[in-house]
Amino acid sequence: MGMSVTTSIATEDDAERILKLQYLCYQSEAELYGDWAIEPLTQTLDSLREELKERHVLVARLGDEVVGSVRGWVDQDGVGRIGRLCVHPRMQRHGLGTRLVRRMEELLAEGEQQVLAYRLFTGHRSLGNLRLYQRLGYRQTQVEEVNTRLSFIGLEKAVPELAATA
């Protein structure tokens, strides 16, 4: 009998597993852009532990194994920021990324601060990420050239309740 994947709020005990998963998942991004010094690959365990205290972090588990993660927070302008989505390579293309992003959107909306929109970004060559975010209702709002090899594509999604009354 197979196990099902569950999602939950990450705890400090998950920090090491999240960091290892992040390192594994961002190898393909580093290769895509020819840059192995990207922040997800150089983040320290202490830095991640601080994020766990300051931001919302969700994990997806298959049994005891962390197979997915996403982070989020609401900024001072009421924008829900979503980042560092990572899904174990063997678990990709099964809807887990979609589940994690949607659950993070819900979690941010349930908070004390009103969320006016959601924003995230990805690299310009990360076509799978761009397709996923567009399927989830995100639309490109900006392009920021980081260097000659990398541009960040900013995407935004309106909050449905607010968009319906606007």
Image (cartoon, rainbow, N blue to C red):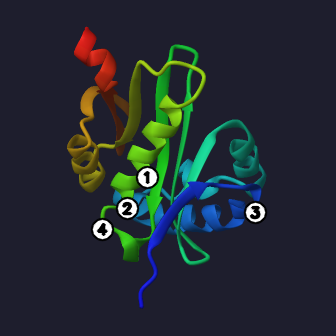
C-alpha distance separating marks 1 and 3: 19 Å
Element on which disc 1 rests: helix
The residue shown at (26%, 42%) is 136
The residue shown at (44%, 75%) is 4
Q: Which residue type carries mark 2?
A: Leu
Q: Which residue type carries mark 1?
A: Leu
Residue 94 — which label?
Answer: 4
Callout 2–callout 4 Cβ contact below 8 Å: yes
Residue 96 — which label?
Answer: 2
> Where does the N terminus fall, quadrant-wise?
bottom left
Label 1 sits on residue:
100
Q: Residues within 10 Å of mark 2 (few under 14, many from 20)?
A: many
Whichever of callouts 2 and 3 sits on the residue coming sooner in the sequence is 3
Name above or below for residue 57 compared with residue 111.
Answer: below
Name above or below for residue 78 compared with residue 8.
Answer: above
Residue 119 position by quadrant: top left
Residue 92 position by quadrant: bottom left
Can residue 146 be spotted in the picture? no
Q: 47 or 49: which is nearer to us?
A: 49
Q: Could you tell me residue 81's position as x and y percent?
A: 48, 32
C-alpha distance separating marks 1 and 4: 12 Å
C-alpha distance separating marks 2 and 3: 22 Å
Q: Which residue type carries mark 4?
A: His
Taking the view exactly as shown, the residue that stands out farthest to the top is 166
The residue shown at (63%, 62%) is 19
Q: Residues within 10 Å of mark 3 (few under 14, many from 20)?
A: few
Q: Could you tell me residue 94's position as x and y percent?
A: 30, 68
Label 3 sits on residue:
13
Name above or below for residue 140 compared with residue 150.
Answer: above
